[in-house]
């Protein structure tokens, strides 16, 4: 869905589409960085980045549930964690409204809190999303662990002073 949405923005401005693999290696540092890295360097101006970012956000809002789904086995795992008394949250570099909508569509029964990038919460690897998630959960840093699947996640855990479990 990220790839489809970025391609919608790129194609609208006459740029070549990117592949899913090209998109995959460009995610993790926020959607502005994703869009920026997909625009041809010779056409990469702040105005073009802003325009394509707006187009991306519109497209992603329409497409974010077309193919996005939880990893195999994750829902039973989340249910087991919740039932054992664990407090769970999502922190993401997607824009906050999208993170909250995806949580509601995919994980509403298991994960009560989702925090994304916004005007008041810096994106990862800054620890802001983690601090906000802990605050909303009413949880202490000393009892928290960060689970992630990217180098940005490992860096975020480090910046927040949390142990990290990295998954592939």
Image (spheres, rainbow, N blue to C red):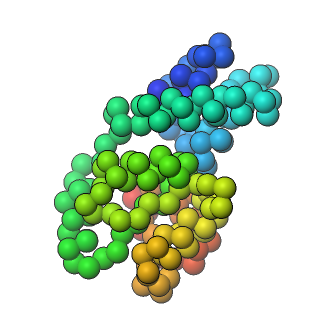
Q: Position of residue 14 (x, y in %)?
A: 65, 13
For the point 55% across and 73% down, which residue is it?
A: 131
**Residue 74 sits in which quadrant?**
bottom left
The reply, left or right, for residue 92 in relation to residue 16 is left
Observer able to see residue 129: yes
In this rendering, the answer to whether 72 lies above or below 123 is above
The reply, left or right, for residue 56 in relation to residue 90 is right
Q: Nearer the viewer, residue 34 or 50?
A: 50
**Residue 46 sits in which quadrant?**
top right
Counting every numbered tag in the picture gives 0
For the point 50% across and 38% down, which residue is it?
A: 24
Q: Nearer the viewer, residue 75 or 120?
A: 120
For the point 31% across and 43% down, which residue is it?
A: 69
The reply, left or right, for residue 131 in relation to residue 85 is right
Observer able to see residue 28: no
In the rendered image, the quadrant that contains the N terminus is top left
Q: Position of residue 12 (x, y in %)?
A: 60, 16
In this rendering, the answer to whether 58 lies above or below 107 is above
Q: Position of residue 70 (x, y in %)?
A: 30, 48
In this rendering, the answer to whether 56 lies above or below 28 is above
In this rendering, the answer to whether 42 lies above or below 86 is above
Q: Position of residue 27 (x, y in %)?
A: 55, 43
For the point 26% across and 79% down, which residue is it?
A: 85
């Amino acid at each position: 869905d990220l790839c489809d949405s970025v391609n919608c923005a790129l194609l609208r401005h006459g740029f070549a589409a990117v592949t899913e693999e090209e998109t995959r290696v460009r995610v993790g540092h926020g959607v502005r960085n994703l869009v920026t890295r997909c625009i041809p360097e010779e056409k990469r101006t702040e105005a073009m980045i802003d325009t394509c970012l707006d187009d991306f956000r519109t497209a992603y809002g329409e497409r974010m549930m077309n193919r996005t789904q939880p990893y195999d086995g994750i829902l039973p795992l989340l249910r087991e964690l919740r039932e054992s008394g664990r407090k769970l949250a999502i922190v993401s570099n997607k824009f906050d409204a999208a993170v909250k909508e995806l949580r509601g569509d995919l994980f509403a029964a298991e994960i009560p809190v989702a925090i994304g990038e916004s005007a008041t919460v810096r994106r990862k690897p800054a620890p802001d999303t983690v601090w906000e998630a802990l605050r909303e959960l009413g949880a202490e840093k000393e009892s928290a662990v960060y689970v992630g699947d990217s180098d940005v996640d490992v860096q975020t855990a480090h910046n927040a002073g949390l142990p990290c479990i990295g998954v592939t």
